[in-house]
């Protein structure tokens, strides 16, 4: 099974210049734990709810903090042709919650979350029963 069979396409993204409070509010409202940061169509980083929560606490004394200040630049990525097992191993070994999925030209095309991997596993197990 390949990443493209399980990944979430068109994920929620942020721009580097977005205010951390706005970004945190969106993650909270959507009940997601991380989002890629995209600039000019290219992946610039990834930001987690923890990154943003801590940043929001900082903004109590320093308003105007931007996503670029708290994101992880150049995150580990996979392509849609990556084997799902290899991607799952990367997530497990590094204790990530998700991996951005990029095209060969570096454009973000999706995200692979732990939930996506579990859904793929369930599908594979169901397919074996048939």
Image (tube, grey):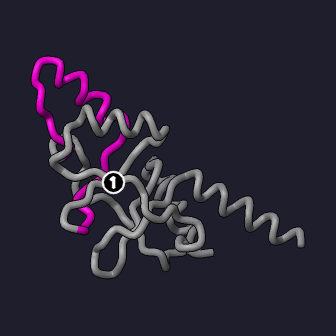
Q: Where is residue 94 in the image (x, y as percent from the top left)?
A: 43, 51
Outermost residue, top direction?
61
Asked if residue 101 lies in the magenta stretch, the reply is no
Q: Residue at x 74, y 59 (%)?
A: 122
Instruction: Identify the image quadrant of the N terminus.
Output: bottom right
Q: In this view, does 18 lie to the left or right of 7?
A: left
Picture layout, residue 7 above or below residue 19: below
Residue 4 horizontal/vertical position (percent): 53, 73
- Residue placed at 47% from the left, 75% from the top? 80
Q: Where is residue 13 in the image (x, y as percent from the top left)?
A: 33, 54
- Determine whether 22 is above or below 15 in the image: above
Q: Answer with the quarter of the image where residue 102 lies.
A: bottom left
- Which of 8 and 46 lies nearest the eye of the viewer? 8
**Which residue is disc 1 drawn over?**
13
Residue name at image x 25 percent, y 49 percent? 72
Picture coordinates of residue 66, whole percent (x, y): 16, 40
Q: In this view, does 127 lie to the left or right of 71?
A: right
Q: Give the range drawn in magenta.
A: 41-67
For image coordinates 58% across by 66% down, the residue present is 6
The number of discs equals: 1
Q: Residue 121 is drawn in which quadrant?
A: bottom right
Q: How crowded is mark 1: few (under 14 residues within 10 Å), some or many (20 or more)?
A: many
Q: Locate the C terminus by quadrant.
A: bottom right
Q: In this view, does 24 lie to the left or right of 57?
A: right
Residue 116 sits above or below residue 41 on the image: above
């Amino acid at each position: 099974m390949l990443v493209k069979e399980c990944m979430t396409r068109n994920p929620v993204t942020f721009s580097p210049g977005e205010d951390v409070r706005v970004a945190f509010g969106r993650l909270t409202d959507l009940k997601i734990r991380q989002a890629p940061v995209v600039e000019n169509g290219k992946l610039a980083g990834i930001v987690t709810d923890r990154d943003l929560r801590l940043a929001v606490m900082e903004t109590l004394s320093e308003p105007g903090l931007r996503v670029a200040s708290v994101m992880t630049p150049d995150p580990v990525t996979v392509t849609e042709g990556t084997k799902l097992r290899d991607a799952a191993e990367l997530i497990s070994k590094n204790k990530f919650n998700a991996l951005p999925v990029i095209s060969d030209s570096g454009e973000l095309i999706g995200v692979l979350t732990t939930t996506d991997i579990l859904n793929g596993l369930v599908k594979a197990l169901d397919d074996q029963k048939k």
